[in-house]
């Protein structure tokens, strides 16, 4: 039932974008969804939603599949219990069009509601207060990002495997993309509302004390501080970082 509000938020943001001259495709990925969820989304889809059912059981694989199936130049994510600010698609598209390099865009603020209440202010990598080392101990951005589809295609989300102790696919992906030269920036004047629930993937990840998958970010950061060029191959980086973490 929570998806009803998310759909209303989605439709408002689409209408705002279309009034600004942009065309929007809606692709709904139902990954192991319940019957009620399928029915609610079907009944409240006032646009021509393209609905695809999957059986991944993994947010990372579901996102990667969605990217492979999308047809637009840009991609934006919305989880089915969260909300977009009405101007998000419009302003994010305008921001993306202003740059020709690889950039992933995030809203300026996220308002958390539900089982927790706080405001999360996103950081811009090109601002002086951005601390690269801090990203190794906490995630700077939520998963509801926006960017060129090509960037997402070139940088797949690391798969989640809570039994092996690996989670936080968006955090691991943020570090991975930065290590490959992708910038993460904010879109001024935009916001999301993120619902906190007692039972969620995030709670499950915390309960098993999972960590992001090892990635080249730490090694690349340390080498940049030493003014040494990063190695070409990424495979040794994964192994070296895994050894460091162990």
Image (tube, grey):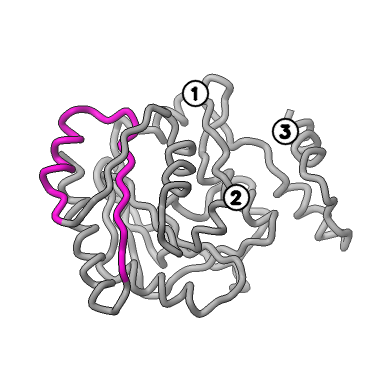
Q: Which residue is mark 1?
A: 208
| Residue 90, x across and y down, in percent | 33, 73
Residue found at x 53% / y 53%:
152
Q: Secondary structure under badge 1?
A: loop
Q: Quadrant of residue 37?
A: top left
Distance (Cα) linking label 1 and label 2 = 26 Å
Q: Circle 2 sits on which residue?
A: 155
| Disc marking residue 82 | none
User: Which residue reaches farthest top?
Assistant: 163
The answer to whether 142 is drawn above or below residue 86 in the figure is above
Q: Is residue 167 above or below residue 3?
A: above
Q: Secondary structure at mark 3?
A: helix
Residue on which disc 3 sits = 245
Residue 110 in the image: x percent, y percent? Answer: 36, 58
Q: Nearer the viewer, mark 3 or mark 2?
A: 2
Indicate the position of residue 193 as horizontal and vertical percent values: 29, 56
At x 60%, y 64%, the residue is 183
Region in magenta = 23-46
Q: Is residue 37 left or right of residue 169?
A: left
């Amino acid at each position: 039932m929570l998806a009803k509000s998310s759909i209303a938020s989605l439709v408002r943001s689409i209408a705002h974008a279309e009034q600004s001259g942009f065309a929007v495709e809606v692709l709904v990925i139902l990954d192991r969804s319940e019957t009620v969820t399928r029915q609610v989304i079907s009944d409240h889809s006032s646009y021509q939603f393209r609905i695809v059912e999957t059986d991944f059981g993994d947010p990372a694989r579901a996102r990667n599949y969605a990217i492979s199936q999308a047809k637009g130049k840009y991609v934006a994510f919305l989880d089915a219990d969260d909300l977009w600010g009405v101007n998000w698609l419009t302003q994010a598209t305008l921001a993306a069009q202003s740059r020709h390099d690889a950039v992933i865009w995030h809203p300026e603020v996220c308002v958390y509601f539900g089982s927790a209440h706080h405001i999360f202010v996103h950081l811009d990598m090109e601002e002086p207060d951005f601390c690269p080392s801090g990203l190794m101990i906490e995630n700077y951005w939520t998963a509801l990002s926006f960017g060129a589809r090509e960037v997402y295609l070139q940088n797949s989300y690391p798969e989640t495997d809570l039994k092996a102790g690996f989670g936080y696919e968006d955090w691991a992906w943020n570090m991975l993309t930065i290590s490959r030269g992708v910038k993460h920036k904010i879109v001024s004047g935009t916001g999301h509302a993120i619902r906190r629930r007692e039972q969620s993937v995030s709670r499950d990840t915390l309960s098993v004390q999972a960590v992001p998958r090892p990635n080249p970010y730490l090694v690349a950061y340390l080498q940049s501080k030493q003014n040494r060029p990063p190695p070409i191959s990424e495979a040794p980086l994964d192994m070296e970082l895994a050894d460091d973490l162990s």
